[in-house]
Amino acid sequence: MPDPFSLSVIVPIWMEAAGVTETLRALQTIRTRGHEVVVVDGGSTDRTVELARPLCDRVVVAEKGRALQMNAGAAAATGDLLLFLHADTRLPDNTLEHLARFVQTRRAWGRFDVRLSGERPLFRVIAWFMNQRSRLTGICTGDQAMFVRRDTFEALGGFQPMPLMEDVEFSRRLCLVSRPFCINEPVVTDSRRWQKNGAWRTILLMWQLRWRYWRGESPESLAQIYRSDVRNAPK
């Protein structure tokens, strides 16, 4: 039986030659079910695009920036349901079954729970708090594989072209339409950022950025803080 929806998985990438093949191979089952995968490259100068082309339905080249790339991918996509997937995140095997249940509801959008890769118990605790916070607030982060009906996405004008917090900002507007449809089965996102920069350091940074954003600080200044912290993280 065909799925009761057409899905476009939109993957923004930049300089991902080392991992793009693994990322896209994990999406081939979705393609064999008749859905599409759209890769949006932000101007990579390595072999990212070359490696991606055989494993997706189209490659779109856009200005670098996750919000800009995701909007460009949505504009090129043909599905009536859009799912935005980070390159370091893996969907569960039964993603399409979960989405089939979603489309039977009146919810306009949704997201998955998240689990961090790696075996450290602290990563399980971090993921639990991320998921609980998302349930309480209705706010989704990009690591949670946000999905949204195309008509809702277009009516809201997509992601704001901002260098950071575009997922939080879009979630706030989506919550005016409906609460998110929360899928308990998690996506798995790579914990390398947490391991490289230190788990507690990353937690504190994320909460600091979120708090300052809620208080009205500009995403541009927050992006500078984020980039500075990443550059100065312990090697």
Image (cartoon, rainbow, N blue to C red):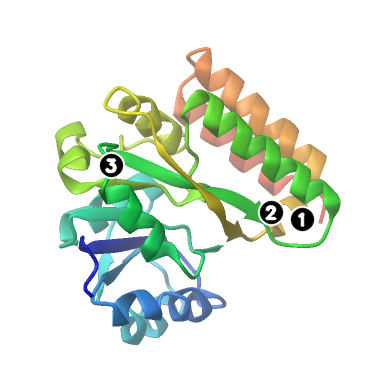
**Pointer 3 and pointer 1: residues touching (CB < 8 Å)?**
no
Query: Which percent across, then down, holds residue 160?
Result: 30, 34
Q: Residue 32 location, x and y as percent?
A: 30, 82
Query: In this rendering, does residue 63 appear at all?
Result: no
Q: Pointer 2 and pointer 1: residues touching (CB < 8 Å)?
A: yes
Q: Position of residue 153 (x, y in %)?
A: 22, 41
Q: Which mark is residue 212?
A: none
The amino acid marked with disc number 3 is Thr
Query: Which residue was labeled with disc 3?
Result: 105
Instruction: Check disc 1 and report the residue beneath it.
Output: 196
Q: Kindly indicate the quadrant of the structure image that contains residue 53.
A: bottom left
Q: Which residue is drawn at 69% across and 41% down?
A: 128
Q: How many labels does the image show?
A: 3
Crowd around label 2: few <14 · some 14–19 · many ≥20 (10 Å): few
Q: Residue at x 28, y 42 (%)?
A: 105
- x and y, in percent, of residue 116 in the image: 68, 55
* Viewer-nearest residue: 192 or 219: 192
Residue contact between numbered discs 2 and 3, judged by CB atoms under 8 Å: no
Distance, label 2 to label 3, CA atoms, is 35 Å
Q: In this view, does 102 lie to the left or right of 134?
A: left
For residue 110, which quarter of the picture?
top left
**Residue drawn at x 82%, y 50% as measured from the top left:** 234
**Is 37 above or below relative to 149?**
below
Kindly state the secondary structure of the residue where label 2 is placed. helix
Task: Compare marks 3 and 1 and give the one earlier in the sequence.
Answer: 3
Task: Tell me the crowding category of disc 1: few under 14, some 14 to 19, or many 20 or more residues within 10 angstroms, Cα based.
Answer: some
**Residue with the mark numbered 2:** 193
- In terms of depth relative to the viewer, which is nearer, 147 or 42? 147
